[in-house]
Amino acid sequence: MGWLIVLALALIAGGALWKWGKLPRSAFEPVGAALLLGLAGYALQGSPNLPDKPVQSPESVAKFDEKQAETRAQMGQRFGSGPQWLVAADGAMRAGVPQAAVTYIKSGLKENPRDPDLWVGLGNALIVHNGGMVSPAATYAFQRAADIAPNHPGPPFFMGLAMAQSGQFAQARAIWTELLARAPADAPWRADLEARLAQLPS
């Protein structure tokens, strides 16, 4: 069916140029060659039998969140090489290249595979790279961080955030409620967590 449509379009274009384009006879051959070249290109690269796939608009793709990075810094450690890799990853996210952010963080994890902040950062970068979808790889990254540092607030906070952003509000509420119950009263991120929890749909 795809080939018939392409051939029909080529014939229509050629006929329109002949009838209304007022082309001189000397232009018939190059125009015909251009149409044939287009058909040849479609034959080489076209895939008319593949199912259609909706394209996401730029607004629908997950983007870097400055407040999210600030919260992660409040929750994280401030020693070792981890923060340097996370700063580089944040720069890549701001530039719109989350794949580079994933690569930076993986490089950091090669140096220190037991850095929970890097694992949290990897989970966040993978979610942005996947357009906001929580992939198994992102879930694994958050779980790895939680296994390394069970009392670290980052893994449950950002896992809950990912759930909330993907519409899984019940799961997000359960994760955040448990985190809030054990959060120190003077934690700098507590107010942000309370606000986010209050904003979740019932």
Image (cartoon, rainbow, N blue to C red):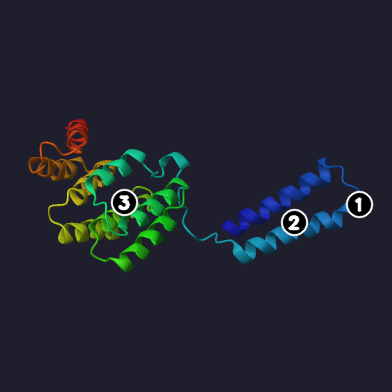
Q: Residue 135 location in percent, x, y? A: 30, 56
Marks 3 and 1, the one that precedes in the sequence? 1
Residue most extreme to the front: 79
Q: Is residue 192 above or below residue 136?
A: above
**Alpha carbon distance from label 2 to label 3:** 47 Å
Asked whether the beta carbons under mark 2 and mark 3 sit within 8 Å of each other, the answer is no
In the picture, measured across the screen, residue 16 lies left or right of residue 68, that is right
Residue most extreme to the bottom: 110
Label 3: which secondary element: helix
Q: Nearer the viewer, mark 3 or mark 1?
A: 3
Compare residues 77 and 62 and report the one nearer the observer: 77
Marks 1 and 2, the one that precedes in the sequence? 1
Q: Crowding at label 3, few (<14), some or many (≥20) Cα neighbours within 10 Å?
A: many
Kind of residue sitting beneath label 3: Asn
**Alpha carbon distance from label 3 to label 1:** 62 Å
Kind of residue sitting beneath label 1: Arg
Marks 2 and 3, the one that precedes in the sequence? 2
Label 1: which secondary element: helix
What residue sits right under mark 3 in the picture? 124
Tell me the quadrant of the picture where the N terminus can be found: bottom right
Tell me the quadrant of the picture where the C terminus can be found: top left
Q: Residue at x 71, y 53 (%)?
A: 10
What residue sits right under mark 2 in the picture? 35
Q: Residue at x 69, y 60 (%)?
A: 39
**Alpha carbon distance from label 1 to label 2:** 16 Å
Q: Is residue 98 visible?
A: yes
In the picture, measured across the screen, residue 64 lies left or right of residue 165, that is right
Q: Residue 128 location in percent, x, y? A: 37, 49
Q: Residue at x 47, y 42 (%)?
A: 58
Q: Crowding at label 1, few (<14), some or many (≥20) Cα neighbours within 10 Å?
A: few
Compare residues 64 and 43 and report the one nearer the observer: 64
What residue sits right under mark 1 in the picture? 25
